[in-house]
Image (cartoon, helix red, strand yellow):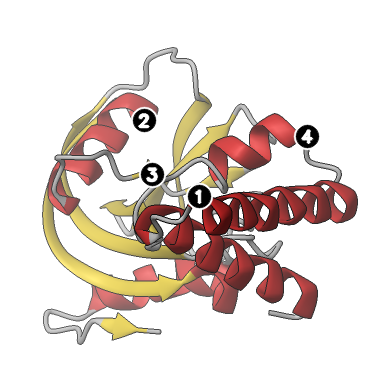
Amino acid sequence: MNNKWLQWTSELQSIAQAGLTFSTDRYDLDRYEKIRNIVVEILHEYTEIDHKKIRELFASETGYQTPKVDIRASVFKDNRILMIKEKADGAWALPGGWADVNSSVSESAIRECSEEAGAIVTPKRIIAIHLANKHNKPDFPFTIYKIFVECELVENCFKENTETLDAQFFEADMLPELSFERNTPEQIKMCFEAKKCEIFETIFD
């Protein structure tokens, strides 16, 4: 992370959440809750994200804090990669999003492709598992694993939905404006490289 304060707040939040989960002393519980509230205030102050959203994304979980999981599908047609235009920022990304509970990685990839791009796919292999704050901007106040899944396209027909504006296929040298927090040019290039290789060693970073 470039912003050291963000790493500190993330670690403090993890300590507070663990304390709230495993402590039984009411005075300690009060102290851990105060630490969590201070973390929320710091994030609000430096990011201008409203308190409610910070608590929903960052400070509302219980139990030992673990990374969130973001699934991204790499789908090709005639050497062009499938991308969706996000309603959130108007930029483009690989179909994907947060993994749902009780869903496998392959099930999540299938669901995201269907919902966001109207694409029916068959997951084939894991291309990479990235720690988001090593690859994507802006830095996140929580840990995210991005799992890139190569999928075979069965058919596609984009349908209007609540998350995306469009779905199209793009050549490697004609990529649209990217949503960098979701995927970077380097990550898209990685997907193209994997597609060329019958045997591709999964990247863990």
* Residue ID for mark 4: 50
Q: Tell me the residue that label 3 is attached to.
A: 98
* Mark 1 residue type: Arg
On residue 117, which mark appears? 2
Q: Callout 2: 10 Å neighbours few (<14), some, many (20+)? A: many
Mark 2–mark 3 distance (CA, rounded to whole Å): 16 Å
Contact (CB < 8 A) between labels 2 and 3?
A: no
Which residue lies at the image location 13% right of the left edge and 48% below the top edge?
Answer: 104
Q: Amino acid at mark 3?
A: Trp
Mark 4 or mark 2: which is in front?
4
Which numbered disc, 4 or 1, marks the residue closer to the eye?
1
Q: Quadrant of the C terminus?
A: bottom left
Q: Is residue 187 left or right of residue 5?
A: left
Q: Secondary structure at mark 2?
A: helix
Locate residue 15, reporting x and y percent.
53, 68
Q: Nearer the viewer, mark 4 or mark 3?
A: 4
Q: Hey, which quadrant is residue 134 in on the image? A: bottom right
Callout 1 secondary element: helix
Task: Kindly report which numbered mark, 1 or 3, lies closer to the viewer in this rendering.
Answer: 1
Residue at 22%, 42% (x, y): give it: 108
